[in-house]
Structures are given as structure tokens and as C-alpha cells.
Amino acid sequence: MKIQDLISEVNIAEKLTQEQLVSIGDEVVTGYETDDESRKDWKDNLEKWTKMALQIAEQKTFPWPNASNIKFPLLSTAAMQFAARAYPTLVPSDGKIVKCKIVGSDLDGEKTKRAIRISKHMSYQVMEEMEEWDEEMDRLLITLPIAGTVFKKTYYDPEKERNVSCLVMPKDLVVNYWTKTLEDCERTTEVHQFSKRRIEEKIRKGLYRKVTLGDPTSDDSIKSKSDPNEMRTPQDDSTTPYTILEQHCFLDLDEDGYAEPYVVLVELNSKEVLRIAPRFEADGVKMGEDGEIVSIDPIEYYTKYSFFPNPDGGFYDIGFGRLLGPINASVDTLINQLVDAGTISNLQSGFIGKGLRIKMGDTKFTPGEWKAVNATGQDIKQQVFPLPVREPSQVLFKLLELLSQSAQQLASVAEIFVGKMPGQNTPATTTMASIEQGMKLFTAVYKRVYRSLAKEFQKLYKLNRIYLDPQVELDILDEPIQQSDYLGNEKEVIPSADPTAASQQERLQKAQQLLQVMGLGTLNPMAVTQRLLEALEEPAPEQLMQQPQPQPDPKAQALQMKAQLDQQKAAMDSQMAEKKLQMEQSAEANKAMIQKALAQQELQHKEQLAALEMRVAAAKLQQSSVEGTQKVIQQHQDHQMSMVHKDQAHKMGMAHKAAQAKQKVKVKPNK
């Protein structure tokens, strides 16, 4: 089969021959058994640590039946204290679990908008869509300090039709003990327990190859309730599960001499191959110039969470189980010895001589009871010999106290860290400094968990790039999230938690210090306020903050000012034109009035001249003499000339007045 055909197949096992399937099944089971044997000592210790943390008290027969069997909760307290601090620190109550970083410059603000969309969407995914994530993260943080190593499996589940990130217990993920990292591991096997119904369901969905597995059997033995020392095998029934091995390995199915990464599922007892699926994408195949495959980038499903790195170089890291286990066992022994010594001291025993004449056998006393004995006082003292018994040793008690203190220092579970108040005269600064120093151990572990959590989110980021349904997310979040938003570098997503702040009080102190520095005027008040509200773990800090007024765009502001000036100039031009029109209309009206007045005066003048001529004519008729006539004529001419002069002077005066009136009406516009 070609590599392109292998990528497109749902179950490659359907295309292989029976001989190939038998060979693959044998190889998977053999590899699993080899890896499981390499970690046998670690697995046995893990079982002891788990029992110690759960304080499982098995029935004792030494030094006598039902002897004291107290389990001191050193390991349990250390694990619970770590989980109680880590869970609220790594999983904030405001629901902001994932944060997308902004890498490089962002002049247009598009990177910021994309980062907000991704942060909001992925936080919603892990807290709402992935129902198992929150609860299993809580289980992880209580298991991690005991076992030292826990795993998360992140993948797309075709049955649930969504991304899944589930917890895998360390005993269920089998890796060779001397493997360095999961990424460089040649073989990783997860052990599943599936019932017959689940197997049939997967066969009908086309996920598993249709095979006959027979009836499942249980190889585990359990203790009988009537006799703890008796082991019995549980009776198999219809609910007895099959043991299915899911192995992530490399097989050369295209027969080109280079093994490709696959996921193979095999039933342990029958070695039947149920499913083979490719563990790589087409874009992860790198081809050479000659057309041959150079390398293939496998898809890694598992994320390793580490407590303390293993100094011996082994794959499985160490936790409080290995560190506190021997001390816890010694403390249990010392406590039980002290209790047993007190029991022997309170309930004395010894020898009774046969010469004492009393009924032999067990003799029990009740408080205030006296029994009659047929013997003298001296005989009783000689015949009764109590065994020499010492009271509980003060040396053992001091040793117990020393071991308890050492364990508390190792696990950082001193009294001040479990809520007990310090002395009344202890300064607050001294108390905070002690807490800070004591939290250094947890801060280092938080950073390791933070690093693993970032890898888990990066796997989820890649899955969103392939399987995201934009319409579903748009209906739920009312956000335009698209698959294209996840085309960037997966390293951009990180947990929103602060691994350096191990407690809420410490985060609050940091925020309060920012408030003090804000008085210098060099910090953004809105950003400082948001930090303070987040330190207080307010669920929706943006609702409490008074949103600042948006700053206007300088370009838009300049355009707006220019438009306002143009509008004002247009209004002024309109007003000036209107005033000019009014003045012109007023001047025309004044001109018409002057012309009318001149016409009236001219008419009156003509009428006066006509009347004068009539009188002159009448005077001519009355004068008889020539001299009189000449005199009248001369007077008439003189009068006529005088009237002409008066008429010209009158016209010039009227014209002068009209010019002055026109000059007054004409007003220059203001600039």
C-alpha cells in the first residue's frame, strides 16, 4: 500500500492479510510485556505508595493478632496540601484557562483581536465542551504528588465528535523505564479495560475489525473478606472486561524500508488486532528529491506531567511517595510500637505457680472486684510473677517527633502552611517571608505542571486547526472564530495561570504593589485595576471596570475639524452674499425714490415756467409801449436765466445728495 492510501484509511487492519495481522499482534504484545517488565520495581512501589496515601490498614498478626496498625497521614497530608494549593492556582475561578500570546508588532490590532478570540474559545472548550477536563485535572493534581508522574491524552474522539483530553493513570501507560522522553519513545502502550458490550459497539461503528475474541477472563486475584490471607479469583460474568492494548508504535506497512507511526489496538489474551490507524498527517511527510520518504512527524497524543525529575535517569519521575514513603513507614512503626507498649503496660501478664490453690484458667477482673484466694499473703507473692514490662519509651517518642518534623520540612507542610496561626509576637513580614521560602518547593513543581499544561493546550490548538466546526462555535459563543485563526504557531497558546504566584495572597500583594507604583503616573490605571480584580478572582472583572472613553483618531479628528471650518466658511459666504443682495436692493430702491423726486421737481418746474410764460404774455398785452415791452422782455429773460441757473443748481444738489446716499449704502464686507 502507498503512503497516501494508508493516510486515507479508517482501519488499515481491514486491508492486511491474516499473516500480517498475526505478526503485528505478536509484536505488540511482546513489546508491551518487555516494557512492563522493565518498570516492575517502580510499579510495585507505586502500589505501596498508593496504599500508604489511602491509609489502607491490612490486618496484622505480629506481634499478636489485631495488634496496633495505625497509618500516620504524612503522605496523605502532603498530597492534599499540594492539590489544595495547585488547583486554584493553575485553574483560576474566573474561567480564563488559556491565553494566546501576541508575538511581534501589532500596528493594526488584528493580532490582538485574534488572540482574544482564541483565548476565549479555548477556555470555553476546556471548561464547557470537554466535560471531563476540570474533574480530571483535579484528580491529576492529587495523584501527581503521590506517583510523581501522570499523563493526559489529548485527541479527537470520533464517537463523541469533539476533542477529548482525559487523564491516564501512570500504571496504565506502559513505557520502557529507560526511555528519555515521550517524543523519542519507539513504543508507548496504554492499557484499556473494555466490556464485551463496548467492543461490540465499536465493531458496529466500524472502528474495530470484526473478530471472535471469546469470553473475557480476569487474571487479578482479590483477598477474601473472611480471611485476609486467603486469595481468590473473582468469578467471571458478562461485565468482565477485555484487556485492550493501544500501542503507539512504528510499522513498515508500505514496505519501503522506513517504518511509519501508527496506533495499533490488540486484545491481550487472543492477540487479535482490532484496529490500525495512521498517527501522522499528509503535511507531516517529508519527501526527498528522489521521491522517497525522508522522515515523518508523528502525532503525539500523550502529555507527561512531572513532579520531581528522576535522578537515576528513568522515565517515571518521583513524587512524595518515594520521598516520604520510607519516613512514613518508620513513623507508622514507631507509633504502633508505642501503642503496643502502652497496651502491654496497661494489660499485664505473667506466670502463676501451681502451688496457689485457685481454679486454673483465665481469670478476669472488673474494676472494684475482689476475689477470695485460699492462700496466705506470702504464698500469693511467691506464686504470681508478672512479666517485666516497660512503659512506652521516651526515646521512641523523640525519634517519632524528629521523623515527623523531617517529613514536614521535606514536603513543606509545616504548621503555618496548613492554616495554623503563628505566635502572637511574630511580625507579619517574618511570617510572609517564611511562607515565601516554604513555597519555593511548590513554585518549582508549579512551573513543571505549567510547562506540561502548555503542551496539552498546544495539542488542542492543533486539533482545532483540523476539526473545528466554525458554525457550532459561532452559535455558542457568538464569536467569529474560524479554522484560519489556528493556522499560526501552536507555541502562542499558554496557560493563563501565573506559576510564580503560589497563593492568592501573594498575587494580591503583587497587585497592591502595582497600585502604589501607579501614583508615579507611569502605569496604565485600567491595566492595574484589571490585575487587582483578577488577583481577587472576580469572575467578570470587565463588568466592574469603568470603560474609558475611546480616543478619537487623529486623522478623523483633523478631517472633522476641516469639515467644520469649510461649513463655517460656507455659512459666512452665504451671509455676506445675502447682505450684499440686501444692500443692492436697498440702493436700487433709494435710486428709484431719488429719480421719482427729481421727476416731480422737474414737473413742478415746468408748471412754474408755464405759469410764468402766461403771466409774461399777459404783461405784454397790457403794456403798450415798446420800452415797456422791452423791459418786460428783459425782465423775462433775466428771470428765465435766473430760473435756469436755479434749475441747474437744484439738479447738481440732487445729484450730489444721491451720490452721498449711494456711498453710505455701499458697505465693505468684514474679513
Image (cartoon, grey):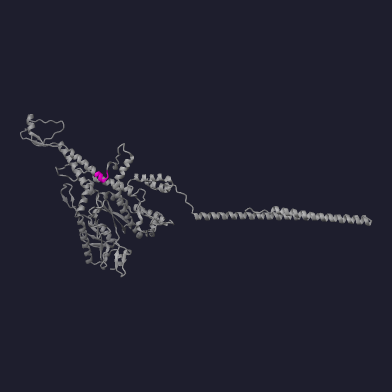
Compared across the picture, whether 146 is left or right of 649 comes to: left
Choose between 427 and 512: the one closer to the eye.
Answer: 427
As for residue 571 lying within the magenta part, the answer is no
Compared across the picture, whether 354 is left or right of 223 comes to: left
Indicate the quadrant where residue 568 lies.
bottom right
Give above or below for 251 relative to 82: below
Which x, y percent locates residue 338?
Answer: 18, 40
Read off the magenta span.
Answer: 407-413
Choose between 250 and 20: the one closer to the eye.
Answer: 250
Q: Residue at x 63, y 54 (%)?
A: 576
Which x, y percent locates residue 321?
Answer: 23, 48
Q: Is residue 213 visible?
A: no
Q: Quadrant of the N terminus?
A: bottom left
Give above or below for 639 relative to 295: above
Q: Main secondary structure of the magenta part?
A: helix
Which x, y percent locates residue 42?
Answer: 21, 53
Which x, y percent locates residue 527?
Answer: 41, 49
